[in-house]
Image (cartoon, rainbow, N blue to C red):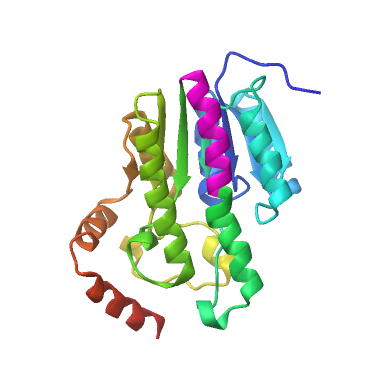
């Protein structure tokens, strides 16, 4: 049975069960949004939905989906496109960490990561973009990464695509009432590294607080910014990476991989 439409705006967040996605869900609920929570782990989604409903008196719909599965992606796309239950904010956040370098990794794992990090963003942004454009309002947030500004394997390449794709979509939707923002965080204190089997690299000052990160991003979205880079340290880093010759960036990436 379809949920009854309320006057509150609705936000759909992928990868909502943990990390940055969970923080988006919490902060959007605190700002008065009903939620559609998307991830693979039903138990976590159910617990989060109960928490948000109790704490903020919003509704929280659970949609279990593995975004490496094309039929599951289409189910989420259909929800975004449903004119009877409009989505006002769409956050493409679902992630996929890789422990091994590209040529040392299993190709099936690389293909699954590609589907989650790029194809799902493409399909869901299309569904959300068309529906929002037709209504004349909406916000799309695509979670990219500072890694997209360097040259380090398929994850870096996927995030570079997400940022560039978001910039192009923002231009296409300019003047329609729909905004698109690529969020490009650096290292963030979540369970992402643990779940991917990756150690915690770098000094402490490089690590961002997810609550501050999401809050800053939502402020940037409200200002209509197309690329949101949280943290002064990463703003400086990205500014430098935009002017450093790519040959230097490639040499540095080779050193990091060794």
Image x and y of residue 161, in percent: 42, 56
Q: Nearer the viewer, residue 178 or 130?
A: 130
Asked if residue 65 shows in the view, the reply is no
The reply, left or right, for residue 69 in relation to residue 184 is right
Image x and y of residue 199, in percent: 49, 73
For residue 104, above or below residue 160: below
Asked if residue 10 shows in the view, the reply is yes
Q: Quadrant of residue 249?
A: bottom left
Image x and y of residue 252, in percent: 29, 77
Q: Nearer the viewer, residue 127 or 66?
A: 127
Quadrant for the N terminus, please: top right
Q: Residue furthest top?
A: 7
The residue depicted at 62 percent of the width and 32 percent of the height is 80
Image x and y of residue 47, in percent: 71, 41
Q: How many marks?
A: 0
Q: Residue furthest bottom?
A: 258
Q: Is residue 240 magenta?
A: no
The residue depicted at 58 percent of the width and 78 percent of the height is 105
The residue depicted at 40 percent of the width and 23 percent of the height is 177
Quadrant for the C terminus, please: bottom left
Q: Which residues are magenta?
A: 121-136
Q: Nearer the viewer, residue 200 or 35?
A: 35
For residue 180, above or below residue 196: above
The reply, left or right, for residue 13 in relation to residue 217 is right
Magenta stretch: helix, strand or loop mostly: helix
The reply, left or right, for residue 105 in relation to residue 153 is right
Q: Quadrant of residue 207?
A: bottom left
Q: Is residue 132 magenta?
A: yes
Q: Residue furthest right?
A: 1
The residue depicted at 59 percent of the width and 44 percent of the height is 14
């Amino acid at each position: 049975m379809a949920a009854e439409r309320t006057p509150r705006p609705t936000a759909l967040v992928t990868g909502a069960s943990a990390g940055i996605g969970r923080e988006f869900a919490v902060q959007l609920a605190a700002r008065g949004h009903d939620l559609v929570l998307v991830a693979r782990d039903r138990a976590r989604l159910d617990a989060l939905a109960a928490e948000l409903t109790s704490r903020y008196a919003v509704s929280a719909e659970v949609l279990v989906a593995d975004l490496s599965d094309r039929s599951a992606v289409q189910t989420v796309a259909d929800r975004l496109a449903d004119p009877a239950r409009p989505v006002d904010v769409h956050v493409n956040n679902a992630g996929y960490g890789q422990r091994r370098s590209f040529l040392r990794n299993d190709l099936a794992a690389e293909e699954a990561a590609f589907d989650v990090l790029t194809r799902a963003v493409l399909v869901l942004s299309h569904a959300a973009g068309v529906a929002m454009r037709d209504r004349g309002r909406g916000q799309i947030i695509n979670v990219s990464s500072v890694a997209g500004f360097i040259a380090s394997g398929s994850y870096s390449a996927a995030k570079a695509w997400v940022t560039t794709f978001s910039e192009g979509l923002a231009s296409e939707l300019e003047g329609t009432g729909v905004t698109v923002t690529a969020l490009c965080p650096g290292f963030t204190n979540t369970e992402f590294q643990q779940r991917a089997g990756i150690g915690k690299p770098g000094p402490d000052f490089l690590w961002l607080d997810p609550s501050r990160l999401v809050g800053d991003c939502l402020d940037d979205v409200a200002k209509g910014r197309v690329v949101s880079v949280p943290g002064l340290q990463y703003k400086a880093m990205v500014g430098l990476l935009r002017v450093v010759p790519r040959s230097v960036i490639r040499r540095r990436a080779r050193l990091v991989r060794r």
